[in-house]
Image (cartoon, grey):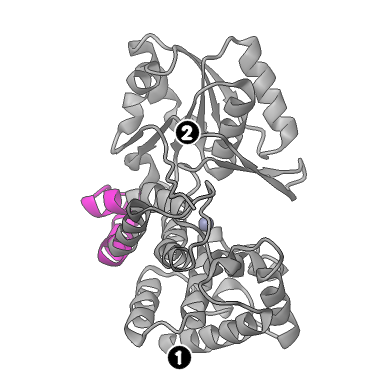
Amino acid sequence: MARIMISPGRYVQGNGAIRLIGEEVKRLGSRVLVVGDRIALPLVREAAAKSFEKSGVTAQYETFGGECSMEEIDRLKDLAEAAGTEVVVGVGGGKTLDTAKAVAHFAGLPVVVAPTIASTDAPCSALSVIYTPEGVFERYLVLPRNPDLVLVDTGIVAKAPVRLLVSGMGDALATWFEADASARSYARNLPGGNSTEAALSLARLCYELLIEHGLRAKLAVEKGAVTEDVEKIVEANTLLSGLGFESGGLAAAHSVHNGLTALEETHHYYHGEKVAFGTVVQLVLENRSNEELEEVLSFCQSVGLPVTLRQIGITDASPEKIRRVAESSCAEGETIFNMPFPVTAEMVYDAILAADRIGEQYLA
Ligand SMILES: [Zn+2]
């Protein structure tokens, strides 16, 4: 199988980076439709408008309807076409960005993605998750290319609730372990090839940055401050984790996350928080060394990521519930089958119970 790696066309990150949006977007076109959610749009609108004006870019602003559904995508696509849009710009969180990517794809236009939080590794990817208008998962829309530009203003990210940055670290924590497992089993990555040495190195670097700078970044963001630590963690959460998961591959941690969503009580917890616990489960499944497990547990405890079932809302962990989680983790098509050994629901059930017990012992 060939080695394949994909990435966004350009990545711009920095404190005040939103002020560069005009000159950055200008490379792609001079009539833009800016789609932003209710929280994000007011945060960037003034600075973005000034920047567009300075660069001679005409901008039209539209508030995102709230759900990344085909209905909303079609509405925005019609709007873009009627306005003679040359570039679609998405501003906000995951669903807004996924919608902008899909609108640009269906309208045949370039897309710029400007995340205002660093809570997942979705911004850089060539993927949109489509929901029904009621918010039920519908399907993955695999896009033919990654965003043309990803622009992250760390000054804005640092003002968002700290729990979002920490969740992004949870999502990023899984990246190295899943890429490593996928490489050892020669599993297909998202673009359908084997991983490159580059993708593996980026995934490894992502992990090292979390261990070195994670806690310090969290403390800085608690004060709304942008430091070098924050820059490194925003890059780890957004760029390195994004490239690492997409071109490295996913494995057990994300499947356990998906399994956990079968339980209603986990719904109040963020994606990255459930992925963090899923990572501990993967480490147990793999029988990783004490040193590796200890490093992950200590990191999670220091930044406040969950390592037990109780910490993701499962206070009554009955065998039936855990079996349901284990079974949906092993549903057909799940990335858990990218592990370098055969995995059964029984093994996952045992690994969840053991990981939870190890987590409880560690916190005691
Ligand atoms: Zn994820």
Q: Position of residue 251 (x, y in %)?
A: 53, 65
Mark closer to the chain start, 1 or 2: 2
Residue nearest the viewer, comparing 191 with 124 = 191
Residue 69 seen anywhere in this rendered image of the structure:
yes
> Residue beneath label 1, please?
361
Q: Specify few, some or many for label 1: CA neighbours under 10 Å numbering under 14, 14-19, or 20 or more.
A: few
Q: Is residue 192 magenta?
A: no
What's the magenta region?
A: 209-234
Residue 74 shown left or right of residue 99 in the figure: right
Residue 120 seen in the current view: no
At label 2, which amino acid type do we have?
Answer: Pro
Q: Nearer the viewer, mark 1 or mark 2?
A: 2
Q: Is residue 226 magenta?
A: yes
Q: What secondary structure prevails in the magenta region?
A: helix
The image position of residue 82, as x and y in percent, is 65, 11
Residue drawn at the location 60% of the way across and 70% of the way down: 256
Identify which residue is drawn at 35% across, 53% down. 236
Which secondary structure, mark 2?
loop
Q: Which residue type carries mark 1?
A: Gln
* Residue placed most toward the observer, 276 or 110: 110
**Nearer to the camera, 188 or 234:** 188
In the rendered structure, find residue 147 and report the number of the disc placed on it: 2
Please say if the residues under marks 1 and 2 sit with CB atoms less than 8 Å apart: no
The answer for how far apart the CA atoms under marks 1 and 2 are is 43 Å
